[in-house]
Image (cartoon, grey):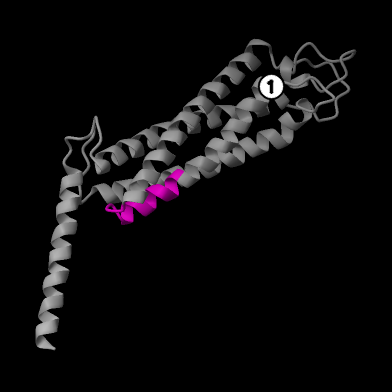
Amino acid sequence: MCGFDKDKGPGRLMKKGLILILVGHINFILGAIVHGSVLRHISKPSQHISTNYTVANIISVTSGLLSIAAGITAIVVSRNLHGFKLQISLLIASFLNALLSAACSAGLLMAIGITIAHNGTGLMFGCNDTVVPINARSPVSSQCPFDTTRIYDTTLALWIPCALLSAAEAGLSVWCFIVGLALRGLAPCGNSYIKEQLEEEVERSSQTRRLMGKHLNVEA
């Protein structure tokens, strides 16, 4: 699990970084669509505040942005495995993104479960309580400041992919975090010896440059 091939590893790390960027963009867009089309109507201060929906969706959008940052960091590290600051940045970004993405996935699954269990009643908090339908799937008309047509199906259709993408972000971030541990030689990946190999490579490169410099000085 902690193995990191010095030859093929950078390419794999770059691919994981590109996937993180792609998944992060999709998750961010889906979360923004949900917030702009549905949640902004039920989270107004003048209406009932559905905290669980709003918090879960905000975390989803934030997770998408952090996944993009973690993916960019992974790509940069894949081009320069020796950089100490880059390795630390990869560890921090991937660790935070793994936690946030896992929390996002759990929060969205909870929001989906609550919505299904109550037939979308929470999605109708912005409507007039005197004529509000029993649930979002009721055919009874309601006086709402937003279009209730297919609000239940649309919200779930966007939340389910967001939850799956967040789980994928968490998995990719964990993989990048393990790579960071291996590059730094930290437990439990301290026995991968990739850190020692990289240090030996840097030392050989330094010796080669010094020898070339001495040779050029002698010729001059």
Specify the segment rendered in magenta: 70-83
Q: Is residue 105 left or right of residue 171?
A: right
Instruction: In this rendered view, identify the residue nearer to me: 42 or 92.
Output: 92
Q: Main secondary structure of the magenta part?
A: helix
Q: Is residue 6 above or below residue 3?
A: below
Three-letter code, disc 1: Thr
Q: Position of residue 67 (x, y in %)?
A: 48, 41
* Observer able to see residue 14: no
* Observer able to see residue 210: yes
For the point 20% across and 35% down, the residue is: 190
Q: How many marks?
A: 1
Q: Is residue 62 above or below residue 142?
A: below
Q: Position of residue 169 (x, y in %)?
A: 45, 35
For the point 47% across and 27% down, the residue is: 102
For the N terminus, the quadrant is top left
Q: Would you say residue 185 sits in the magenta stretch? A: no
Quarter of the image where one finds residue 133: top right
The residue tagged 1 is 51
Q: Would you say residue 76 sits in the magenta stretch? A: yes
| Secondary-structure class at tag 1 | helix
Q: Is residue 157 left or right of residue 212?
A: right
Instruction: In this rendered view, identify the residue nearer to me: 39 or 193.
Output: 193
For the C terminus, the quadrant is bottom left
- Kindly give the residue lying farthest to the bottom in the view shown: 220
Q: Position of residue 150 (x, y in %)?
A: 72, 26
Quarter of the image where one finds residue 179: top left
Q: Position of residue 204 (x, y in %)?
A: 13, 60
Q: How many neighbours does mark 1 have within 10 angstroms: few (below 14), some (14-19), or many (20 or more)?
A: few
